[in-house]
Amino acid sequence: MAADGRLGPDPGRQQPDGTPVGRRIIVSLLALGGVGVLGGNALQSGLSRVLAPVEEHDPTGLVSLFPLGATFRYYSVTGSVPTPSPTSYRLTVSGLVRRRASYTLQDLQAMPQSSLVEDFQCVTGWRVLQVPWSGVELSRLLDLAGPTAEATAVRFRSFDGIYTESLTLAEAREPGVLVALRMLGAEVTHDHGGPVRMYVSSNYGYKSTKWLGGIELTRGQVPGYWEPRGYAIDGRIRE
Amino acid sequence: MDGSDATDGHELTRFSLAERAVHWTLAVLMVVCIVTAAILYNGFLGVPIGHRRVVELIHVYSGLALPLPLLAGLGFTAYRADLSRLNRFRPTDWAWLRSPARRDGTIRVGKFNAGQKLNAALTAGSILVLLASGLLMYFPDVARLSWRTGATLVHDWFALGLGVLVVGHIVEAVHDPEARRGMRTGRVRRSWALKEHRDWVDETARGTVAGTDEAER
């Protein structure tokens, strides 16, 4: 550590007595920030294992105001998202398919449900560990629709009217890609993208379209909401 | 517009126009950052307001701009002089921080008290950390995922800390109309300065009377 130098320009007064505590504080904060960036991942995993259960069951919601552990941040890209009634909700399957379909919430609930417990990982870094999800495997809906030979990708439309995202058809058929009806042990809430949202376990969160209203088979992936805004069309999580 | 001329017997010049411009530009940017941060962070604000991309861009650009007024100030003598004052802690500063009677004037205070010095350093350091961690979050291709997770945690905690500092700063200002006038008009009453910043009053007196009353404390 070099000896402390004087602050550069000193306007002609015999002031600089004392120690440069201000600069030391700034350097210390920068060091602390650096340690946090490098070690925060491990710290947060530990913290959230302890605190996530507390937070999810905190009736006041106050715990979630503090960045104690890993919690959901609620993303909505439009002005307001309509709340469909349980009877008015429809999920359409269209595009390059042999059999178009329109499912009500009841239709989806009546289909075989798959459950899994997986992390939700945002591309910006936050993650929620071990979230329980359940719903209909996307591959089941795709089989029912029968993609035509030209179909190579799946496009998801949000009923917020703006948001779309996409997967390759191969990715869309993988296990762990759910048309989710339940998460965190309850029906998917409006803020979480309910009544029906996507959950794509192998991809960053922006691929898990909220407020799912339409599934469309396309030739080639159509860039979605985030792709022109800087996120890759391939949303696979890479460590 | 010299920083420390006594304007007349009753008033002292505390902050130059440049310093006040730095302060108020920073203040506006800071409030924009805090309001947009609250929307981005809290679902009960974020979901009804929506437009996440717009809110995010406002937050990012005002965050990127946050250090600019601080850097621009370096072009001005009075600002550099005050920066040097804020940087340096004297032994009396530690005593002032520890003393329950710090406000009664027995421990003499220069242009800035130790609390103001701490606030300045913590604010400046937090701004730099938030800038760096924010950039890591904004450009996901730059750093690996575990660093982005760390950057998010760091950004959250430093934002909370800086928020507390800003609120504390405003609370202090609310309680001291003369200090507010100093940052608004640049001038403060001599009587206020004698009570709150005794050594600074002496220092400005020495500056104008060219050291004649060095012996007079």
Image: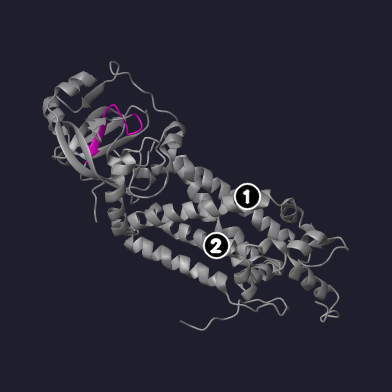
At label 2, counting other C-alpha atoms closer than 10 Å, the crowd grade (few under 14, some 14-19, many 20 or more) is: many
Closer to us: mark 2 or mark 1?
Answer: 1
Q: Under tag 2, what secondary structure?
A: helix
Image position, residue A15 (x, y; %):
69, 77
Image position, residue B159 (x, y; %):
47, 53
Q: Under tag 1, what secondary structure?
A: helix
Which numbered tag is attached to residue A92?
none
**Which quadrant holds residue A82?**
top left
In which quadrant is the N terminus of chain B drawn? bottom right
Residue segment shown in magenta: A190-200
The relative height of residue A25 versus residue B44 in the rendered view (above or below) is below
The residue pinned by badge 2 equals B124
**Chain where mark 1 sits:** B
- Residue at the extreme top of the image, as rendered: A87
Q: How many marks?
A: 2
- Residue at the extreme right of the image, as rendered: B9
Same chain check for tags 2 and 1: yes
Residue at 16% in and 26% down: A97
**Chain where mark 2 sits:** B
Marks 2 and 1 sit apart, C-alpha to C-alpha, by 19 Å
The residue pinned by badge 1 equals B171
A227 relative to B110 in the view: left or right: left
- Residue in the foreground of this view, choosing between A54 and B207: A54
- Residue at the extreme bottom of the image, as rendered: A3
Q: Which residue type does callout 1 highlight?
A: Val
B49 relative to A9 in the view: left or right: left
Residue at 37% in and 65% down: A35
Q: Which residue type does callout 2 highlight?
A: Ala
